């Protein structure tokens, strides 16, 4: 089973993909991670991508498609793929169909995690982590039991991601709506799109996705 997880940054795609990897043995294809891995490994596509990035350019759809194809070729036919962060544009959606068809695969579901923008801003801007062990916390939803001390390792040092600010989050939301949302009608016309409340409890989101995918 091959699926696409859609949703703006912070919607929980990575978390839900990790759960599917653990529980169903699926393979998460995150183009950003794959790109970094290919560059590090020095694969032909990685070398090509590194040259583009070193020159300050944007990696082309052709390179991204090549990465996807490379990864699918390394997977067993029985392993399902979770596309996370791809496709982002109509051209990439068309390309993905061709990539899958060329390998005897089809797309089963496109699952969009729907979010409330204001609530998502609160969720993202309030999060921080222990600088020592990486345990996650939130100003509103999950503070340490003892103020200023990590529950997990006892450290008193915490950090926030510099891009976890309201302006950046709203810019990403706007980019998602402008670039990614337009591909939804392509999949809706094929009856592939299902929507899940991305603002719900993590377990409820997982259960909703499990119901869509079936046993």
Image: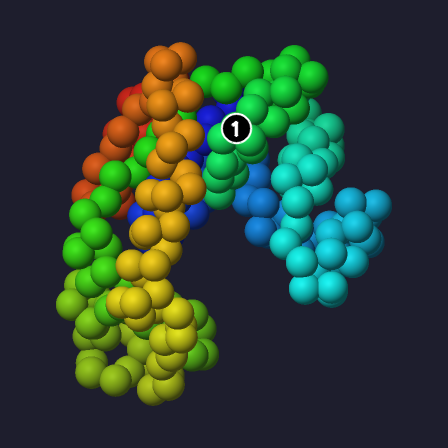
What kind of element bears circle 1? helix
* Display coloring: rainbow
168 vs 14, nearest the viewer: 168
Q: From the viewer's perspective, is 53 left or right of 187? A: right
What x and y, as percent, mark residue 93?
A: 52, 28
Q: From the viewer's perspective, is 131 left or right of 63? A: left
Residue 167 lies in what quarter of the image? bottom left
Q: From the viewer's perspective, is 121 left or right of 88? A: left
Q: Name the residue: 23% across, 60% down.
A: 121
Local packing at callout 1 (Cα closer than 10 Å; few below 14, some 14-19, many 20+) is: some
39 vs 93, nearest the viewer: 93
What x and y, as percent, mark residue 87?
A: 51, 35
Q: Name the residue: 67% across, 58% down.
A: 57
Residue 74 lies in what quarter of the image? top right
Q: From the viewer's perspective, is 68 left or right of 113? A: right
What x and y, as percent, mark residue 40?
A: 75, 58
Q: How many marks?
A: 1
Q: Name the residue: 41% across, 35% down.
A: 5
Q: Which residue is under mark 1?
A: 93
Residue 132 lies in what quarter of the image? bottom left
211 vs 65, nearest the viewer: 65
Let me know if residue 136 appears in the view.
no
Let me know if residue 134 appears in the view.
yes
What x and y, as percent, mark residue 39?
A: 74, 55
Quarter of the C terminus within the rendering: top left
């Amino acid at each position: 089973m091959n699926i696409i997880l859609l949703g703006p940054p912070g919607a929980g795609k990575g978390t839900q993909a990790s759960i599917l990897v653990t529980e169903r043995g699926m393979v998460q294809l995150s183009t950003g991670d794959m790109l970094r891995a290919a560059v590090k490994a020095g694969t032909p596509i990685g070398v090509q991508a590194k040259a583009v990035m070193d020159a300050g350019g944007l990696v082309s759809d052709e390179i991204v498609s090549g990465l996807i194809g490379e990864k699918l070729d390394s997977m067993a036919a029985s392993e399902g793929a979770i596309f996370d962060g791809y496709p982002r544009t109509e051209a990439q959606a068309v390309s993905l169909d061709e990539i899958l068809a060329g390998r005897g695969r089809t797309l089963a579901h496109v699952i969009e995690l729907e979010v409330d923008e204001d609530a998502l801003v609160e969720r993202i801007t309030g999060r921080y982590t222990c600088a020592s062990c990486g345990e996650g916390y939130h100003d509103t939803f999950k503070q340490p039991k003892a103020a200023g001390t990590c529950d997990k390792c006892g450290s008193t040092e915490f950090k926030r991601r510099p891009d976890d600010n309201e302006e950046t989050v709203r810019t990403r939301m706007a980019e998602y709506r402008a670039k990614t949302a337009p591909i939804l009608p392509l999949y809706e016309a094929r009856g592939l799109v299902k929507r899940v409340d991305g603002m719900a409890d993590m377990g409820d989101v997982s259960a909703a996705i499990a119901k869509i995918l079936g046993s």
